[in-house]
Amino acid sequence: MGEQERIREVLRLAELDDAQRKAVGLPPKAKVDWVGRKDGGKRGELAAGLLVEMETRLAARYKDCRWKETAGLLPMSSFEGAGRAAKKAADDLFKAWTDNAALTPNQLALRRRPAFVGSGADANLLEVSDFSDRARARIPITAYEQARYTASLCADLMQKHHFTPYGGVDEEAAQFLDAEVLRPFTKTHESTLIACERYGFAITEPRNGLIFLSGSLEGWKPSDGEHNPLVAARKWKAFTKLLHEYVHTLQHPNLVHVGNQSQTVREGFCEYLTQAVIASLKALPAHDAYLQELDDLVTGGFGLSAVPQAITGYTTPSDYVTYVADTRTFVREFHENALYAAFFQGHTEFLGFRLETVAEPALPARGDVRPVHVPHTVTTLADLAGYLQIPAEALVADNPGLSGDRAAWPSQIHAPGFRPHFVVINRPDDEDEVAVETPALAAAQNGVTPDVLQAHNPPYDPARPPSWFFVPTT
């Protein structure tokens, strides 16, 4: 199995179609069709299996959240401090990655808005169970959407049947899922689905910076006030939830083009990064000044005597366990920096894509020498040798295809002392602005100075940016 295919398998990305496979030099894949397409018995078996598994998953979720239906409800303004603490902890840990991402002015302005405002016209921290706020944010509370989510958790059963109803690839499969599973399930379990949609989740909409959280607190009423241990513990628990939701807002917009249909990319990556922040806090001494600073934000300094139980006892939500396991496999096989670069900076080439196009396979490395791509603005062998500071005859000896016209050169070559850097272009669907990685951003991401980067690359033209930079490794 090639690297790209392994990445797609680990991250549960949609399979490449034959045209995409051909474009990147892969042979057609033997097709194993949905076993129920022409077999009524198998169709019925899949529908019945999904309905049973969905009912089990829904019952477990409702068991966890049903208490919220009758619990007291803290106002969202109560969690502003927890949100600011979550933002601080994540920003402090990931600053080197988030500060060097190609973002449009609108995206930068959204990130610089005050985070976690729980009241007033500028509120961006909202009660998840509120029908009107959810409707205004175009994330309405509906039983059907909760049924869709519950079905998406049954990925292993679907895979067993070679059933791929998502992403618009198989319309017949999507129609079957809708008619034979989702609509009957919604009709049978409507009230439970609505309850889970209102109380079972926090929700983040990264495009507009809105975060929805539950303010439910069992055993609390407004007359109790907020300066008490019960509320302090609840605010620290909200801190961990808001940490996950805030990390969602740091996701580079380009990631959606690759992983929007993959729960591993959408939730597994985010939860993995959340756990990284939690681990950094767990490692601190009980009375560390940094923890005290966070407690001042979360609870107003209400008697922190040890690392809060919400941190020491933090566990991954059950729905995300599989996706975090997938993410850890990706990190183990392809390096943690690949995840960070893809998530925070839009370097989706580490996930097998360049922008929205499937990436061509890389040449095999020679020892520690990874292949580099030759920017389109390098037109002569003399210029190439000058930028790489490698004699032309040595380059040709190592890469015979370099001889002759530039049009006949291979797209990738081996150049000892250099590695490739793909130039990210961020082109939002809803904006006229485009953000492109500049030499300064690329240099910061690779730990070199802009002057050093520029010395080894053609002059940078922002009107016609290159697709690649040469990055010196020594």
Image: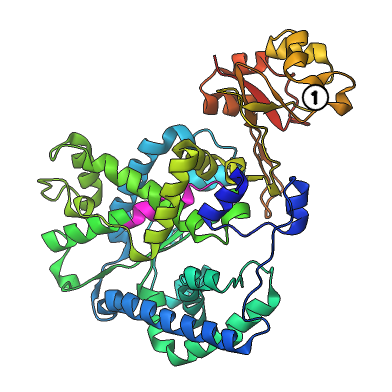
Q: Which quadrant of the structure image shows residue 127?
A: bottom left
Residue 336 position within the rendered picture, expressed as x and y whole percent measured from the top left: 45, 39
Residue 100, placed above or below residue 203: above
Which quadrant holds the C terminus? Answer: top right
As rendered, which of 378 and 224 lies closer to the eye?
378
Is-magenta flag for residue 66? no
Q: Identify which amino acid the numbered label 1 is placed on.
A: Thr
Which segment did they paint magenta?
Answer: 241-252
Q: Is residue 244 magenta?
A: yes
In percent of width and height, residue 446 lies at: 54, 25
Identify which residue is drawn at 79% across, 13% down: 383
Q: Is residue 44 visible?
A: yes
What is the magenta segment's predominant secondary structure?
helix
The answer to whether residue 123 of the structure is visible from this angle is no
Q: Identify which residue is drawn at 47% across, 38% down.
A: 335
Which quadrant of the structure image shows residue 461? top right
Left or right: residue 223 compared with residue 369: left
Element under disc 1:
loop
Locate residue 298 relative to residue 349 in the image: left or right.
Answer: left
Residue at which label 1 appears: 377
